[in-house]
Amino acid sequence: MTKGRIRARIRRSHLYTFGCLRPQTTEEGGPHPLQLHGPGYSRTVYCNQPLIHEKKSLFYCNNNISTTKYNVLTFLPKALFEQFRRVANIYFLLAACLSASPISPFSPLSMIAPLAFVVGLSMAKEALEDSRRFLQDVKVNNRKVSVHKSNGEFVPRSWQRVMVGDVVKVEKDQFFPADLLLLSSSYEDGICYVETMNLDGETNLKVKRSLEATLSLDNDGAFWDFSGTIHCEDPNPNLYSFVGNFEYERQVYPLDPSQILLRDSKLRNTDYIYGVVIFTGHDSKVMQNSTKSPSKRSTIEKKMDHIIYTLFTVLILISFISSIGFVVKTKFQVPKWWYLQPDNIEYQYDPKKIMLAGMSHLITALILYGYLIPISLYVSIEIVKVLQASFINQDIQMYDEETGTPADARTSNLNEELGQVDTILSDKTGTLTCNQMDFLKCSIAGTSYGVRSSEVELAAAKQMASDMEEQDTESDLSNFPMIKGRVPRQNVRRAEEIELETVVTSKGDEDKRPAIKGFGFEDSRLMNGNWLKDPKADIMLLFFRILSVCHTAIPEVNEETGICTYEAESPDEGAFLVAAREFGFEFFRRTQSTVVVREKFSASGGVVEREYKILNLLDFTSKRKRMSVIVRDEEGNIILFCKGADSIIFDRLSENGKMYLEATTRHLNEYGENGLRTLALAYKRLNEQEYTEWNNEFHKARTAVGTDREALLEEVSDLMERELILIGATAVEDKLQKGVPQCIDKLAQAGLKIWVLTGDKMETAINIGFACSLLRQGMKQICITLDSDAVTNDRLEVVKGNILNQITNAAQMINMEKDPHAAFALIIDGKTLTYALEDDMKHQFLGLAVDCASVICCRVSPKQKALVTRLVKEGTGKTTLAIGDGANDVGMIQEADIGVGISGVEGMQAVMASDFSIAQFRFLERLLVIHGHWCYKRIAQMICYFFYKNIAFGLTIFYFEAFAGFSGQSVYDDWYMILFNVVLTSLPVISLGVFEQDVPSEVCLQFPALYQQGPKNLFFDWYRILGWMGNGLYSSLIIFFLVIIIFYDQAFRINGQTADMAAVGTTMFTCIICAVNCQIALTMSHFTWIQHLFVWGSIATWYLFLLLYGVLPPKYSKTAYQILIEVLAPAPIYWTATLLVTVACILPYLAHISFQRCFNPMDHHIIQEIKYYKKDIEDRHMWTRESSKARQETKIGFTARVEAKIRQLKGRLQKKQSALGVPSPTYT
Amino acid sequence: MSSSGAAGAGSTDSTAARRNTKRPKYSKFTQQELPACKPILTPRAVISAFLLVSVVFVPVGVASLLASRKVVEIVYRYDSKCIPKNVTNKVAYIQSSADKACSITLNVTKHMKSPVYIYYQLDNFYQNHRRYVKSRSDEQLRKRGEENETSTCKPEDMVNGRAIVPCGLIAWSLFNDTYSFSVNKRNLTVNKKGISWKSDRNHKFGKDVFPKNFQNSSIIGGAHLNESIPLREQEDLIVWMRTAALPTFRKLYGKIEEDLKEGELVNVTLNNNYNTYSFNGKKKLVLSTTTWLGGKNDFLGIAYLTVGGLCFFLALAFTIVYFVKPRQLGDPSYLSWNRNPGGH
């Protein structure tokens, strides 16, 4: 023992250097325990002896987790460091430091106060956000779990106090507190079911199995004197591997991942388990997997940095100009200015030390013109974004009633990025779908059953009905030039015809959705045993038997109700079993070798329990695309039941098995078109001899040793699955989340591209593609795949060449395509993607993907999801949004410009990594199209205005310099300058950033095309930014020179007084305040009382301030003493000058926007006008027509699908008519 | 890390409660549905806005221009005239202690109604230089007790270890030319009371603060002050201490409280003491009447007329263009998808 510990210590020293090494060898299931040595395998755990692990050599980190950025001690230095990483803040800090020296043109207070305010506010925000993370951690750390204390007694203990070596008891539906070694479970054979949703996003249950040696430890008392030692690998992030030995009762057993229960997965279907803690806290695999979420910045903010750099350049430039002016003046003129006593002068003005004076003046100038850089910009933006985020959080229409979760903007610095998204990368399971299947239709013996319509059908029918109606009245067929100018009578007839064909399926009512989960079937012909009356009842019986027998699910009988529920590998299987149950074939028991089904309706009339002996089970693989069972029924007949993809099954039919082939094919196409996922069912009767022969082969193959075992098995299986007899097909609706197709439709119309990245198999992904209308019939599917043989056999170059070939061929095909309506879909699987994402090929791949209307990547790993996201982000340079719900989406969510997590379901990892979380995919529409659109425009306008106002203000200081001998004197009082950014102009611009709405929210939804203003960046392009800067330059010139000339030298009052510096400065400042506030009023298009209050209130505040400041004793108010009451207010010229300057400042902008509005209006202008004149109410028809047109040309989504269908029908009609001899294009 | 919900059975109550608490409260504010006015720039609004501006601005402009025209202003530059012809070194002359009296004659071209304000105007004098502006002590000026508050006044703060009152460069360089006026040999009284701001007299310059050690240092700047008159009554100083914004400025010297008739000749006897020669500054004497607008200021009126005219022109232009190429407001055919169908 002691020896081992010493060794352990030596190994542990390697941990810190080589800890991340992956195991080199995994001799899984090897008969002998692994010899664990070398770096990376040094962990030793003494089971049930947690106290040992408190000592130093074996001390492992505790189970306390922390995801916060700061703690109490590090907060101040770290947060300050974060703040001063911004260039502008460093500049202001330096300026504040220098403000104490005589170089500074301002008083220290006026430099330090705004900086302290700005930095303090940002840090307060950081602290708040971090405290939320802290509380979340505390909640997790304080969860309780039963831990073995001593003497077989288990006591609840909080998670954070769980130690390595502890024996814990986890009960049903609880999370595992740490990585555990499974010792035993409530099941005799030591298995347990685990849901790993939080780890990989998969919802199906996984089976874990304890070692046989520990099976006996199945009650609390058994742990009285339990002890054992685990030697295993060091903490690593590899979720699917584990290497270790378990030394128990002098025996050493090898451990593999199937005995390891990972933290954050959940115990299901098992009453309790016992386990030993191996990895705690940050050592656990899931924590090792978590990466620091990268801090993201929006495009606008990045561009803003460029503007700030530009302004810095301008600042330095004018400072240099100013310094040169100063040097020239000082050198050549100041010696003559006796009133300055040039012989007795401080160094910073001294003409004799001109270099020193020049340098110090440069610093003075840099501080003086600092008003060009808006110090309050960052903090104002931060305030605005927090408020915007709170609006997102409070949006009641993004609140999910079912789960009780509102939307949550977890980071507020990406709000405006939501308005610029170009590509959405979506996870499938849990995001688009609920991962719940509904059995909806079936085709048995050439007859289709099931009257209820799929969601796709319903929506298509609805849309077409409304479209037809519109076209009737409108005759607006500009989209279809070939039928243009037809006589109306024919028009009507055609419409009727189309309606007949399409609306026939829309009888089903949406609100009559199935009461039984997974079963949406409705057809009286099959229900309640009615099928018995059908002449083909025997075939139907077979059909139902296949459903109830051919699967791998485990039944679970609810003891109260007696109803079975099923734990199936895939949700379709679950749906089949539920369907079979509802049809009267209830599968309720499974043993290793039998399946027992209760048949409610039989020819004899009573309830019969039938037991099928499972002889063989030929598993489903994505390559085989089918599964079969060979059973012996109670009569002793051997039957093979097979279900699989239609194309596969159809190839394997016997001659006499093709009886229903034609009808079934037709039905299958129909189902597929309606977005259902289909499987064909077939069977085959075997005779004893035939089976035995085959079974021998099969057994041989199964026991074969070597790499070709799989291939051999497949070959043998293939031999059996031939000469099948087709009996029908099933159609299952992969239940999409509520509103998903509509949301995708709207998003597509808003011009967004949607990529689906899923871990699912290709067929499932394609089916979902159909259901979401990302794919449709008539779309050309480009599948880029690899033969699995090719991968194993060929060399890398050949494989890559093959893929490249496929990509270039597809690209050529797209280029050759003439039909403008042709749409392509790219489907690629994970294996191929590995090669396609390599550096030499990824750009071709991306090029192809961008040309396709929809892209579906299946079987992708979490890492590939992130890689694809990065490729899109970096390759196209557009904004990407990733949305997902599971831990497998975390990489993608962190990689994308915006990560959105679906909350409300159990797993929280995606949410924790995300920037925004919403409860349902459909809220994405509102998040992007309304909030994104608004936030983008608000922030863009706000930043532009910010630069405008600071340029307008900052430059006047510069101009004045030229008139003050470049001495660094400012014409304004220090207080005016402090208040300018912080009080007098901040609230209006914040109200612009928080409350501005170009169009109301419902219009955003009705006119999705408006969203494109964001991705096209119409409001923050350099043209606009420079325009605003130009406006600022113009305003500064107008303000300064008009005021200077008006107050030049003559008396400005009837009493003969002339204006001094205070009067001129105050007038100038009044003009600035009035001009910039009137300017923002012109910029706004939405005035609630808040905007009115802030804008006009700011101007009023200025006068009020001036009044109060003037009333203060002269000690405080200095030159501004009584300036308003005594000096300025009685002078008419003060008021007239203010009016003149204000009007002159805003005149060009007013003329510009009036001109633009009158002659080149943007979309939102027109819509504002329509709303203003209430035309949308008077002319409802125009309104709906325009909103239906207001969308981007898209090839995905419902609308596109319906359009394609209409095109197709019209084409068909035309053919029909021309065949009938009606000369269609001309009048007769 | 992971979810909040290790929710066992029986926690439905708490989840229901949680739902209620998490549900955002509805209010028009949080849902961004506050009633708002959404003014839009219709052509009519634009045209009437421009017209309104011109309607307001043109009369104001005309009124200002008329007011400015009513002002009679006599400006006389005397800095070069008042140097004897034989003096070559003007600076040396001005710094000498010679008698620098000088006589000039101003011609009243137009009737000047009383009060006629007398200004001196300096050019190229940087009263707004940072060093100059800062060189004063308001505390000292206001209170007798704070006489020694001269730290801001450098280099004109102390002389022989005693504080100067008033200290600083501004006071030190006080303008010291003097004028006396006569018409037809009759002296005009120059009222020098009330030329400064009342608040300055009452609150910024103390009634018990008397000049001390002023102009006692080695270099003498400008005017001397009578040490027996409190600062409050030294209005020339008070006026001077209000620093001008620009290097060219006028300061009030006094008022003549009687009309000057057209054609009268005003004889001015002035003492040309102040040194503007070293920095090539000009000195001017200005007599001016005022109106509600102040002194002569054509620019304001012209600017008003220009902006008003421009607005009128813009209104006209918008009207014309609007009639030539009208756009019905809210006409959907201007929407981008209607203007270039297909080609988004």
Image (cartoon, coloured by chain):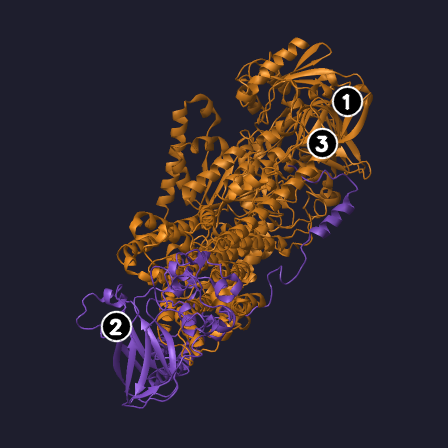
Chain colours: A orange, B purple
Q: Secondary structure at mark 2?
A: loop
C-alpha distance separating marks 2 and 3? 93 Å
Q: Secondary structure at mark 3?
A: helix
Quarter holding the N terminus of chain A? Answer: top right
* Image quadrant in which you'd find residue A1155: bottom left
Q: Label 2 marks which chain's residue?
A: B
Horizontal placement of B54 versus A237: left or right?
Answer: left
Kind of residue indicated by mark 2: Asp
> Which residue is under mark 1?
A188
Disc ID at residue A159? 3
C-alpha distance separating marks 1 and 3? 28 Å
Horizontal placement of B241 versus A292: left or right?
Answer: left
Marks 1, 3: nearer the viewer: 3
Instruction: Mark 2 and mark 3 in contact? Answer it, CB < 8 Å.
Output: no
Q: Secondary structure at mark 1?
A: loop
> Which residue is under mark 2?
B79
Name above or below for residue A88 compared with residue A182. Answer: below
Residue depicted at 45% across the width and 42% down the height? A873
Mark 1, other Cα within 10 Å: few <14 / some 14–19 / many ≥20 = few
Instruction: Mark 1 and mark 2 in contact? Answer it, CB < 8 Å.
Output: no
Mark 3, other Cα within 10 Å: few <14 / some 14–19 / many ≥20 = many
Q: Nearer the viewer, residue A159 or A674?
A: A159
Instruction: Mark 1 and mark 3 in contact? Answer it, CB < 8 Å.
Output: no
Kind of residue indicated by mark 1: Glu
Number of marks in the image? 3
Q: Label 3 marks which chain's residue?
A: A
User: Same chain, marks 1 and 3?
Assistant: yes
Marks 2, 3: nearer the viewer: 2
